[in-house]
């Protein structure tokens, strides 16, 4: 009798501690996807597949997100099974491909377009982050995970547009303004402002607030409660169309039609400011810069300065020259 009681306790415990099986998700990916070039595209509808690519693909793309690299393509054949979205994220996760399963967990959430979510294990491009029921939690890219909210927004939007109010956020003793674009007209924010509320809703995380800003319609007026130097303030900000972030290098100079690469090289000629493709940015206001984050951080400091122009130092074929950009 005692042995039976012990056995009855052990069986539920064994079931509870059994590893989660993601094999069904792997099989689903195998039958609900097809190859596009060197990558795999998976079914999100009976007739459409989704996949990530850094460069615009050569195939006939119905819709592409230039910021996150998502692509929607019509399938040559209908699918019986498609991948849908979880309403709530499952506890056990894996990155699934047709020929591989990598179990792990999400370490950090996606904050806007520049900071994708991070997984505990190395990921391969276009692996679906999923639970055992095979719903979509995210999609793997070389820079991290695009979360389901952004994938759903892409699929449900007629055109790919994001909104911007000239700030980039982080989680530091609240939802903190980490960077401010000094060229953004009528922006009321300063570096280190802490966002307490947005449109009457409590600001919980930088991921949440960034997402709601990006998904707003350009032209929308949002109302904020912030804390600045230990004082609460109410601010209003009008959404503008987002011009940079993610795969579109985010230097804050996009308002001037100037696009810098990751190495701070100019991507295209800008005749108005006499800047040419291949010129390289060396300094912002006398400070050496080597990354886009360096540029944004230094420009953020100018939001609070009385300087009327931003002075940049560029290098071109062995000589250096200065360019001045006006602040609004």
Image: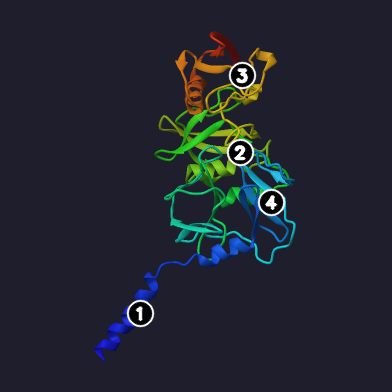
Tell me the distance, in whole angstroms, between the alpha carbons under discs 4 and 3: 35 Å
Of the image marks 2 and 4, the number of the one nearer the N terminus:
4
Of the image marks 2 and 1, the number of the one nearer the N terminus:
1
Residue pointed to by mark 3: 328
Tell me the distance, in whole angstroms, between the alpha carbons under discs 2 and 1: 55 Å
Residue nearer the viewer, 208 or 104: 104
Marks 1/4 in contact by CB < 8 Å: the verdict is: no
Q: On the rendered image, what quadrant is the N terminus found in?
A: bottom left
Residue pointed to by mark 1: 11
Of the image marks 3 and 1, the number of the one nearer the N terminus:
1
**Residue 312 seen in this snapshot:** no
Tell me the distance, in whole angstroms, between the alpha carbons under discs 3 and 1: 70 Å
Q: Residues within 10 Å of mark 3 (few under 14, many from 20)?
A: few
The residue sitting at the left extreme is 2
Res 156 label: 4
> Which-is-in-front pick, marks 2 and 1?
1
**314 is higher (above) or lower (below) than 88:** above
Numbered label tally: 4
The residue drawn where x is 59% and y is 61% is 29
Residue pointed to by mark 2: 222
> Which-is-in-front pick, marks 2 and 4?
4
Tell me the distance, in whole angstroms, between the alpha carbons under discs 2 and 4: 22 Å
- Scheme of colours in the image: rainbow
Of the image marks 1 and 4, the number of the one nearer the N terminus:
1
Q: Residues within 10 Å of mark 4 (few under 14, many from 20)?
A: few
**132 is higher (above) or lower (below) than 107:** below
Q: Secondary structure at mark 3?
A: loop
**302 is higher (above) or lower (below) than 232:** above
Q: On the rendered image, what quadrant is the C terminus found in?
A: top right
Marks 3/2 in contact by CB < 8 Å: the verdict is: no
């Amino acid at each position: 009798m005692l042995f039976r009681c012990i056995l009855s306790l052990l069986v539920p415990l064994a079931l509870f501690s059994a590893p989660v099986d993601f094999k069904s998700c792997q099989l689903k990916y195998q039958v609900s996807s097809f190859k596009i070039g060197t990558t795999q595209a998976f079914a999100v509808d009976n007739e459409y597949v989704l996949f990530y690519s850094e460069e615009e693909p050569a195939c006939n793309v119905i819709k592409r997100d230039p910021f996150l690299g998502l692509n929607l393509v019509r399938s040559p054949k209908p699918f019986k099974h498609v991948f849908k979205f979880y309403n709530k994220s499952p506890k056990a996760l894996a990155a699934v491909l047709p020929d591989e399963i990598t179990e792990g967990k999400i370490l950090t959430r996606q904050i806007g377009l520049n900071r994708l979510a991070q997984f505990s294990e190395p990921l391969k491009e276009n692996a679906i982050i999923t639970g055992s029921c095979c719903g979509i939690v995210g999609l793997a890219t070389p820079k991290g995970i695009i979360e389901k909210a952004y994938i759903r927004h892409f699929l449900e939007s007629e055109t790919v547009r994001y909104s911007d109010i000239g700030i980039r956020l982080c989680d530091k003793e609240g939802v903190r303004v980490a960077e401010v674009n000094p060229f953004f007209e009528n922006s009321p924010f300063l570096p280190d402002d802490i966002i307490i509320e947005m449109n009457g809703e409590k600001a919980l995380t930088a991921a949440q607030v960034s997402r709601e800003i990006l998904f707003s319609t350009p032209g929308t007026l949002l109302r904020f409660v912030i804390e600045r130097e230990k004082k609460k303030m109410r601010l209003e900000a009008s959404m503008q169309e987002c011009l940079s972030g993610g795969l579109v290098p985010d230097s804050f100079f996009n308002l001037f039609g100037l696009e810098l690469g990751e190495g701070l090289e100019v991507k295209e000629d800008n005749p108005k400011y006499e800047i040419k493709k291949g010129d390289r940015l060396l300094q912002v206001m006398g400070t050496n810069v080597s990354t886009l984050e360096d540029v944004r951080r230094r420009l953020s400091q100018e939001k609070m300065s009385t300087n009327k122009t931003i002075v940049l130092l560029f290098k071109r074929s062995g000589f250096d020259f200065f360019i001045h950009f006006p602040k609004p």
